[in-house]
Image (cartoon, rainbow, N blue to C red):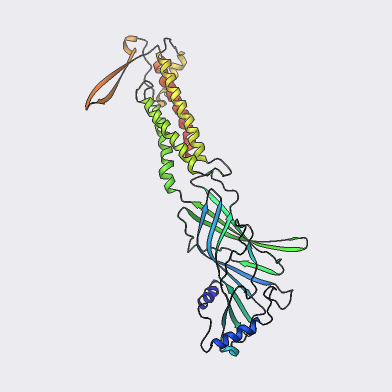
């Protein structure tokens, strides 16, 4: 059927064939429009159903996330049989095609009834209608107006942003006629996959047509619902946001492998806190807040911010505990456990010897550059019994907890 539509479209430029002149055209128009009522459905019997076939030739589409509006730019081809417009081309100089203004003949009152534009009743413009004679008793009419259809998408959900998919529907119906008078027909796939719709941010991943009919108050209602599934192009957002989220995760996990008393540990956590806070506000500003659920990335950076603050508090607490004037003696069975396979898994250093002369101090060598000169700085950290070693044990346990939580969050990105 699409080939027929294209054939008729190509013939729209030729209103006459060889042998036809202006007199033939004028005479044919006068004969066809004489006693023609453009407000009445053009059938010989009111029991006849007018079949209207609909085709879409698309330019592209736009989707406004803030207003939830989808705008489809297209040509809408409507083909129907007008039982009152027919002629014998031999009687009119072999004239087989003629054009009418939309105000001259009857048009199917197809309406996008879920259109967002309340004042726009005629979505399909004011373009010529092409009449093609098939034989002396049959002809078809073709109307191909440009259209910009604006509909509001329901159930918009940005939870999976920037991997989100949205579904929008365009509902077509004959406004003033029931299903027994006008029958709407359309292909199962209105948008060809060979020529995808153009949009820089969204891809049309699926489209389908569902024809519905129901009876209410002894009236047959029909409609055609065109469903469009669009998916966001996420590569730019992944490079600029998701990678940063993973980087913050790595930084916090790495901080737990630094010595609790290392000077660079708190700066690493503070940098992660700063980045986390900046990106949380940035994500909140660019993702619309009119979705059904809170976007996952907002939840991710929110939860990550809390975890970063807990890591900072944890580090300060460990330092205070290790430098406190108290002795923590672990039970022998815990020491034995940590000196065995558990300690190996946690990558712990050997348990400090009871002899304070051997393991009473830990020397941390740190490099610091100042005025282009490097010097070694030794920071002396006194162990209060098992306190310093136990701080490392707690650090490893906290690392496992954070690793589990962050792994769950990252895998759901």
Q: Nearer the viewer, residue 19 or 51?
A: 19
Image location of residue 251, percent across then percent down: 39, 32
Q: Is residue 130 above or below residue 353?
A: below
Question: Which quarter of the rendering shows the N terminus?
Answer: bottom right
Residue 340: quadrant of the picture: top left
316 shown above or below 156: above
Residue at 47 percent of width and 26 percent of height: 310
Residue 114 picture location, percent across and down: 63, 57
In depth, the one of 47 and 331 nearer the eye is 47
Identify which residue, 166 or 33, lies in the foreground. Answer: 33
Of residue 138 and residue 352, the one placed in the foreground of this image is 138
292 up-or-down from 168: above or below:
above
Whether residue 119 is visible, yes or no, is yes
Report the side of 394 relative to 181 (left or right): left
Q: Where's residue 94, x and y in %?
A: 56, 88
In the current view of this chain or complex, which residue is farthest to the left? 373
Report whether residue 338 is seen: no
Tag count in the figure?
0
């Amino acid at each position: 059927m699409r080939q027929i539509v294209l054939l008729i479209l190509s013939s729209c430029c030729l209103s006459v064939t060889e042998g036809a002149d202006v007199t033939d055209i004028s005479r044919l128009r006068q004969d066809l429009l004489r006693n023609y009522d453009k407000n009445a459905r053009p059938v010989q019997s009111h029991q006849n159903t007018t079949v209207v076939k609909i085709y879409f030739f698309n330019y592209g589409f736009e989707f406004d996330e803030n207003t939830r509006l989808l705008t489809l730019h297209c040509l809408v081809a409507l083909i129907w049989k007008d039982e009152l417009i027919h002629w014998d081309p031999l009687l009119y100089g072999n004239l087989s095609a003629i054009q009418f203004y939309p105000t001259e003949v009857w048009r199917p009152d197809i309406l996008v009834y879920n259109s967002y534009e309340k004042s726009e009743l005629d979505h399909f413009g004011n373009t010529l209608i092409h009449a093609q004679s098939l034989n002396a008793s049959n002809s078809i009419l073709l109307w191909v107006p440009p259209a910009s259809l604006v509909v509001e998408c329901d159930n918009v959900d940005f939870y999976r942003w920037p991997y989100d998919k949205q579904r929008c529907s365009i509902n077509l119906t004959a406004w003033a006629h029931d299903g027994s008078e006008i029958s709407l027909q359309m292909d199962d796939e209105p948008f060809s996959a060979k020529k995808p719709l153009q949009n820089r941010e969204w891809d049309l991943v699926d489209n389908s047509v569902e024809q519905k009919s129901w009876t209410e108050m002894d009236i047959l209602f029909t409609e055609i619902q065109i469903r469009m599934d669009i998916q966001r192009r996420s590569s730019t957002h992944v490079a600029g946001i998701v990678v940063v989220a993973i980087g913050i995760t790595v930084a916090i996990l790495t901080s737990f492998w630094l010595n609790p008393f290392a000077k660079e540990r708190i700066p690493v956590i503070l940098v992660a806190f700063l980045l986390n806070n900046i990106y949380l506000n940035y994500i909140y500003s660019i993702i619309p807040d009119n979705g059904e659920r809170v976007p996952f990335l907002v939840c991710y950076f929110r939860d990550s911010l809390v975890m970063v603050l807990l890591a900072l508090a944890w580090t300060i607490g460990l330092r205070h505990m290790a430098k406190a004037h108290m002795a923590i003696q672990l039970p022998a069975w815990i020491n034995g456990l940590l000196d065995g396979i558990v300690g190996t898994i946690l990558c712990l250093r050997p348990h400090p010897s009871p002899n304070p002369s051997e393991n009473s101090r830990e020397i941390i060598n740190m490099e610091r550059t100042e005025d282009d000169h490097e010097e070694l700085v030794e920071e002396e950290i006194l162990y209060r019994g098992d306190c310093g070693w136990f701080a490392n044990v707690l650090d490893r346990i906290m690392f496992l907890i954070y690793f589990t939580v962050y792994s769950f969050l990252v895998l759901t990105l």
